[in-house]
Image: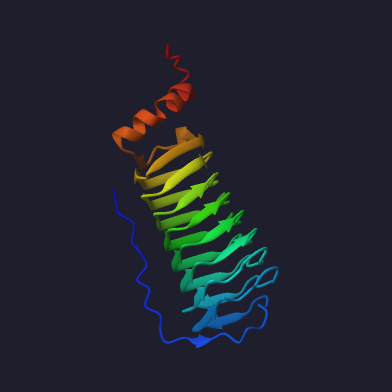
Amino acid sequence: MRAARRPELRLPPLEPYGGAELEPDGDYDGLAFQELDFAGQDGAGARFMDCALTGCALDETRLRHARIFDTALTAVRGVGTDLAETTLRDVELTEPRLGGTQLHGAVLERVVVRGGKIDYLNLRKARLKDVVFEGCVLVEPDFGGAHLERVEFVDCALKGVDLGGATLKDVDLRGAASLEIARGVERLAGAVISTGQLLDLAPVLAAELGIRVE
């Protein structure tokens, strides 16, 4: 089991963002976005490099195909944020409050999600490499058809996870505070779980194998 490589984020001195609306294919470099409301705005294809977003509202914000590198997102919140097919590399996401976030087809590399709660996270067919979920609550996350490599779940609550069609390699679930798999338990090959988690999953595994327990 190879451990995930965490991002080493060292932001340079940042300039405050002027507050204009996001622009499609915009280029944002070395900026601090503080307590701004981006609800409904369109930043599809934008590039964020060496940025910090703190306390920003992302309700229905369109960031499809965006590229987010060496960036810290802290206490961002929103429902229906569209990050489909986005690339996130060397990113720290801390204490988010998100719901229905679209990350299908996205690429996440050296990403840490720390604290907070994300409901109905859509990561279908995404590629996750060196990703750590730490101390957060994930409600019905969808990893259908996704590829997970060197992904760790530490002190997380995982509720109603969908692993249908997913591929796992060096995925460490032992640190999950709770593990509830709604679909795709047969895709756990390539993951490591604890003895206690095995006992909790026994009924689901038995049902998958067609074993009747009386």
| Vertical arrangement, residue 139 with respect to residue 117, above or below | above
- Tell me how many marks there are: 0
Which quadrant of the figure has residue 104? bottom right
* Quadrant in which the C terminus appears: top left
Residue at 44 percent of width and 68 percent of height: 91
Q: Nearer the viewer, residue 32 or 125?
A: 32
Q: Position of residue 66 (x, y in %)?
A: 59, 69
Q: Nearer the viewer, residue 150 or 142?
A: 142
Colour basis: rainbow
Up-down: is 43 above or below 105? below
In the image, what residue occupies the spot 38% across and 46% down? Answer: 169
Image position of 79 (left or right of 189): right
Q: Quick check: 99 above or below 193?
A: below
**Residue at 41% across, 84% down:** 12
* Image coordinates for residue 110, horizontal then vertical, percent: 40, 63
Please state the horizontal and vertical placement of residue 199, each as a whole percent of the image. Answer: 35, 28
Q: Does residue 189 appear left or right of residue 47 in this picture?
A: left
**What is the x, y in percent for residue 9?**
38, 73
User: Residue 118, relative to residue 74: is it above or below?
Assistant: above
* Residue visible at 35% across and 71% down in the picture: 8
Can I make out residue 162 in this image?
A: no
Q: Is residue 23 left or right of residue 143?
A: right
Regarding residue 156, the answer to whether it shows in the image is yes
